Structures are given as C-alpha cells and as structure tokens.
Amino acid sequence: MKRPNPNIFYTQPTFRADSPDIAKAKGQTDWTLETPGIRLRLAIDYYRFEAFANERDRNARCGPTAHEDVRYAPAKMKDLRHNGISLDDIACGYDIDHPDFERVVSPLFDAAMRRLIGEVVNDPDTTGEELASTEVIIARARYSIVAKSVGEWIKFPISAMAVFEKGDRDVIDRTIAWLENRLELTASPLLFGAPPN
C-alpha cells in the first residue's frame, strides 16, 4: 500500500450523520437507484480525500459539495492514517487547467496503473473482453480506465462520469486526452514482463 505524500495538502469528505437519506434507508437491504438513501450511499463512494499542492488551494476547495449532505474539511496525515487512506483512495483536487495539475495527478495515475497492470498480470478476468479496470478521480469527475482484450492486443479505453458535480465537457475531454497520452507512455510491454522489441 503506497503512502500519500506528506508534503501535499489534503481535504477529507464529511457526511452529515442526520441526513434524511440515512434515516430513510435504515434497515434497507435491497438497493436500487430509487431506494431512499441510495444518493448518499453513492456519494460516500464518489467523494474521496483530495490532494492539493498548497494550503491556499486546499482551503479554497473546502466547504459544501454538490451533494447537500457532503462537505469537505482540511485533512492532516493523521486523518489519512486513521482512515487507512493510501494513494489508491485519493483524488486529484485540480482540473487539467491548473498549473499544479501534473504534479498532483501523476502519482495518483501511476498508482492506478500499477493496480490495473497488477490485475491484468496476476488475476485477469478472462471470461470476456474486459480484463480489469481502475479509476482516477480528478476535480470530482471519475475517469475509468479499462484493460480490454482485443485479439492479441490489450487496449485501454478511458471514459468519464460526473455524477454529483457538474463537469465541463471540454475540460473532461481534454483530461481524457491527457490520460490517454500518459497511458501510452506508461503502458509499455515492460510492465507486463515482455521483452522489448
């Protein structure tokens, strides 16, 4: 489990304990999108600890989110340790247009790719085209990377989804292009143990 960088500033999502969603969902065992409480349950998975290059940027992102029962608060390394947070559980707080974007997102992307390649090599799902998948959350939009078997090749299509936060389509498209470019540089045959040509 790769540890977060102590020189980066973090925010922590907090969830309102007396949310009407939670009260309605007590005792519920069958979950559908129409089930009371599902929105907060989705939010708990959607909102993650976020990383920023400096305290000013971190503080600017604290406060309410698009979900009425979720807020962000400053987080310290002890908060990450207390919650068992590793690089796999951290989102990039910046969008692609921020000057510190690459500095913050690069280790998060690398951790996601190590996870994806590890799944493909060690425990591939060979029942279909999809071998494994991972995700990176950037500026509260979720970017999914899938390892797909296409004949003798493995392709890595990337998709994006903004559930609670309103995503700018242009920013999302440019972020996907950045991820695709970074993926081309990262998904070398050497990662799979193949000899170079």
Image: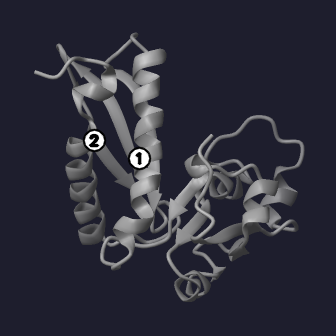
Q: How is the image coloured?
A: one colour
Q: Helix, strand, or loop for circle 1?
A: helix
Q: In the displayed structure, does residue 37 sit left or right of residue 88?
A: right
Q: Quadrant of the N terminus?
A: top right
Would you call the spot at circle 1 few (<14 residues within 10 Å), some (14-19), or many (20 or more)? some
- Circle 2/circle 1 CB separation < 8 Å: yes
Amino acid on which disc 2 is placed: Thr
Amino acid on which disc 1 is placed: Asp
Residue annotated with mark 2: 186
When the figure is inspected, residue 111 is found, relative to residue 155, above or below; the finding is: below
Residue annotated with mark 1: 110
The numbered mark, 2 or 1, whose residue comes first in the sequence reads 1
| Closer to us: 95 or 30 | 95
Q: Say if residue 19 shows up in the picture.
A: yes
Badge number at residue 179: none
Q: In the displayed structure, does residue 114 sit left or right of residue 153?
A: right
Q: Say if residue 142 shows up in the picture.
A: no
Q: Quadrant of residue 56?
A: bottom right
When the figure is inspected, residue 59 is found, relative to residue 197, above or below; the finding is: below
Query: At which x and y percent is residue 74?
Result: 70, 77
Query: At which x and y percent is residue 184?
Result: 20, 42
Instruction: Name which residue lies at 23% across and 33% down.
Output: 188
Q: Helix, strand, or loop for circle 2?
A: helix
Instruction: Name which residue lies at 45% across and 68% down.
Output: 139
Query: At which x and y percent is residue 65?
Result: 60, 76
